C-alpha cells in the first residue's frame, strides 16, 4: 500500500491537521474519513518524530520539507502544519 497523493494540499497558506503515531512498525500515511494519520518509526524524543512527519508529508505533497511549518502540537499527537 503506497502513501496517498496529497499534492492537492500543496497550495501556500493551506493548514493540514494530522494525527501522529510514533514508534510504528513502518513509515506511512493514511487518509480516511477526512483524517490524515502519519505513522513514523522514530520515538518522540528531541523533535525527531516531528522531523520525520514533516519529511513524509512533504514527500506525499510534492513540496520541499522547508515549506512545511509546524504551527501547533510540538509535543502532542495532534499537529497542525502550514504550507508556506
Image (tube, grey):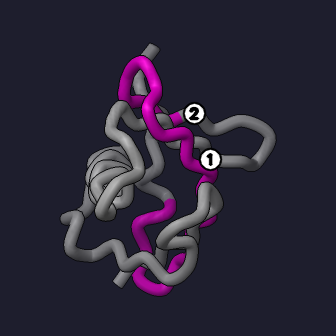
The first of marks 1 and 2 along the sequence is 2
Residue at x 36% of width, y 45% of height: 60
The residue tagged 2 is 30
Marking on residue 47: none
The residue positioned 25% from the left and 62% from the top of the image is 63
Which SS class for mark 2? strand
**Which dot marks residue 36?**
1
Quarter of the rendering containing residue 32: top right
| For residue 35, above or below residue 75 | above
| Circle 1 crowding by C-alpha within 10 Å: few under 14, some 14–19, many from 20 | some
Rendered location of residue 74, percent (x, y): 48, 72
Secondary element at tag 1: strand
69 in relation to 76, above or below: below
Q: Quadrant of the C terminus?
A: bottom left
Q: Is residue 35 left or right of residue 24?
A: right
**Residue sitting nearer the eye, 27 or 58:** 27
Q: From where the camera sits, is residue 51 visible?
A: yes
Which residue is outermost to the top?
A: 1
Instruction: Say which residue appears at 62% left-offset and 51% top-offset.
Output: 19
Say whether marks 1 and 2 touch (CB < 8 Å).
Answer: yes
Indicate whether 43 appears above or below 77.
Answer: above
Amino acid at each position: 500500500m503506497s502513501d496517498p497523493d496529497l499534492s492537492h494540499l500543496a497550495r501556500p497558506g493551506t493548514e493540514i491537521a494530522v494525527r501522529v503515531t510514533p514508534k510504528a512498525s513502518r513509515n506511512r500515511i493514511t487518509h480516511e474519513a477526512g483524517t490524515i494519520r502519519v505513522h513514523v518509526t522514530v520515538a518522540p524524543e528531541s523533535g525527531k518524530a516531528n522531523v520525520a512527519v514533516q519529511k513524509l508529508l512533504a514527500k506525499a505533497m510534492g513540496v520541499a520539507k522547508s515549506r512545511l511549518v509546524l504551527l501547533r502540537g510540538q509535543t502532542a499527537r495532534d499537529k497542525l502544519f502550514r504550507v508556506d
